[in-house]
Image (cartoon, helix red, strand yellow):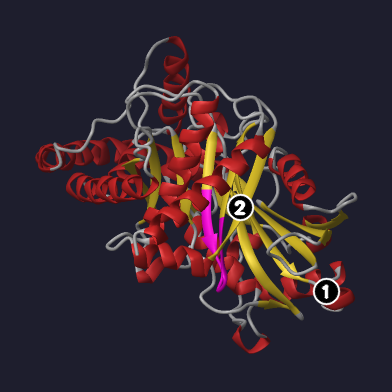
């Protein structure tokens, strides 16, 4: 019987009609000339049943403990209801990029039913003549709750969906039944005692890490100080989501990397977000003098649990250098902030957040989340990050679903109080996607922000190539 970790349970606690806590992967496929490679709904259901049935996530749901005395458990359903979880729709004319983004905003703002397996698929037809894409495309939106998955495990599911028949595992799953009330109560009492010991151990291990982290910060004391209080996007969010995506030729991203040495592809993506935020906040007269900070999830998985569900991540703070005007100098500064962030989290201990969340009772954890959200609205409360920027690895080789080739994956992350703007970076063989999801109230002009992202990349590319 598998129980959710404290970090996974936190996403359940935060889930509401205002803050649905799911991740959405949008896979764009080439439908071919005259739609000859179009995927049908029946074909998708058949492929999903064949390739995804062995994955535990697809046939298990939450079993909650009465009064929130303990974190929920995963239990199996008899068989996934593929018809209930997989649907299709046609985009209204003209089927352009903005129409798709509007549809995704509605889909992403809709809360999932937490009483059934926490996944959905939506097959979207009718994408035509979008610049940079084949003339006729369709999209598949795979929606999974964050309590069950992080970026790495989402990538594993996407890879499994595109397996050849010979690669599909034939391992028979074991049935996990719901625990009895007596068993739940007994485990809750044991876990309560165990958390007290774990909290003491976590605090004992944390103190030396804090000392090491302080020494590490001193080594990077020449870095410009960052903004510690909230920005436009660090407040209470409301219902409704705006989304957007820009598609960047991978060859041009690599050209920037060659021109500006020692930076990574992730640095380039972060710098593009930084440039877009700068332009957007300048327009709205809300750009602070100090740099904003991005929260960058980092993978804590070992080879043994690379395909496991749930979350095994920590979040690194990286200055975005939004106070700088030159795009290449901003990229170099982002790289330095990222190096400092990595050193800091290594000194502190990358598993600290997971250890702390596993050391608290569910009630305390949930109340702590709500209290921090309230405190930030009542005063100039410090915030760790101003936006999230997650790099979800894309496929290293070409993938096909039926006869349709995957052109590019797009990601949409969850929005919550104090974090009203979330970016996801992903890629295929030929393209990189830079996508965002945002509270509709905090970012009402999604088309403008999408253009800011495009402008930021174009400025960085032009400035980088001018140096070669």
- Could one spot residue 1 in this view of the protein? no
Residue marked by disc 2: 246
Task: Check residue 318 in the rendering and tell me which mark sits there, or answer none.
Answer: none
Q: Nearer the viewer, residue 460 or 142?
A: 460
Q: Judging from the image, what secondary structure is the residue with disc 1 in? A: helix
Q: Residue 26: horizontal and vertical position, in percent?
A: 67, 57
Q: Which of the 4 image quadrants contains residue 428? A: bottom right
Tell me the magenta residue range.
424-433
**SS assignment for the magenta stretch, majority:** strand
Q: Measured along the vertical axis of the image, is residue 282 above or below residue 313?
A: above
- Residue at point 79%, 74% (across, down): 46
Q: Judging from the image, what secondary structure is the residue with disc 2 in? A: strand
Q: Measured along the vertical axis of the image, is residue 228 above or below residue 5?
A: above
- Residue at point 65%, 45% (across, down): 244
Q: Is residue 426 magenta?
A: yes
Residue marked by disc 1: 43
Q: Residue furthest top?
A: 378
Going by the image, does 157 lie left or right of 404?
left
């Amino acid at each position: 019987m598998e129980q959710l970790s404290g970090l996974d349970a936190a996403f359940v606690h935060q889930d509401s009609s205002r803050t649905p806590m799911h991740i959405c992967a949008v896979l764009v496929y080439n439908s071919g000339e005259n739609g000859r490679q179009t995927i049908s709904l029946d074909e998708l259901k058949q492929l999903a049943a064949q390739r995804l049935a062995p994955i535990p996530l697809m046939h298990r749901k939450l079993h909650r403990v009465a009064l929130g005395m303990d974190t929920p458990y995963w239990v199996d359903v008899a068989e996934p209801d593929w018809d209930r979880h997989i649907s299709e729709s046609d985009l209204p004319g003209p089927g352009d990029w903005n129409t798709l983004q509007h549809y995704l905003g509605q889909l992403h703002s809709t809360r999932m039913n937490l009483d059934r397996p926490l996944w959905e698929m939506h097959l979207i037809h009718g994408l035509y003549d979008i610049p940079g894409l084949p003339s006729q495309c369709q999209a598949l939106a795979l929606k999974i709750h964050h309590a069950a998955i992080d970026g790495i495990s989402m990538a594993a599911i996407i890879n499994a969906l595109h397996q050849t028949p010979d690669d599909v595992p034939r391992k028979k799953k074991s049935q996990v039944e719901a625990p009895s009330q007596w068993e739940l109560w007994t485990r809750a009492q044991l876990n309560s005692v165990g958390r007290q010991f774990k909290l003491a151990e976590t605090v004992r291990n944390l103190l030396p890490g804090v000392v090491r982290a302080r020494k590490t910060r001193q080594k990077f004391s020449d870095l410009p100080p960052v903004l510690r209080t909230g920005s436009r996007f660090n407040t209470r969010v409301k219902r409704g989501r705006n989304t957007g995506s820009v598609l960047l030729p991978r060859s041009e991203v690599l050209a920037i990397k060659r021109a500006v040495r020692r930076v990574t592809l992730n640095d380039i993506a972060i710098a593009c977000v930084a440039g877009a935020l700068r332009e957007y906040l300048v327009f709205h007269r809300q750009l602070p003098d100090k740099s904003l900070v991005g929260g960058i999830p980092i993978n804590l998985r070992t080879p043994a649990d690379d395909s496991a569900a749930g979350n095994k991540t920590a979040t690194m703070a990286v200055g975005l250098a939004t106070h700088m005007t030159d795009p290449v100098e901003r990229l170099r500064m982002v790289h330095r902030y990222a190096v400092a962030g990595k050193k800091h989290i290594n000194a502190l201990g990358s598993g600290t957040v997971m250890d702390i969340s596993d050391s608290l009772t569910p009630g305390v954890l949930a109340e702590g989340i709500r209290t921090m959200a309230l405190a930030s609205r009542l005063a100039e409360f410090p915030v760790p990050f101003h936006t999230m920027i997650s790099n979800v690895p894309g496929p290293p080789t070409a993938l096909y679903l039926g006869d349709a080739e995957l052109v590019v994956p797009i990601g949409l992350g969850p929005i919550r109080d104090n974090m009203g703007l979330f970016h996801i970076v992903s890629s295929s063989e030929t393209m990189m996607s830079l996508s965002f999801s945002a509270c509709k109230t905090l970012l009402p002009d999604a088309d403008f922000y999408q253009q800011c992202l495009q402008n930021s990349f174009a400025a960085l590319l032009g400035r980088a190539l001018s140096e070669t």
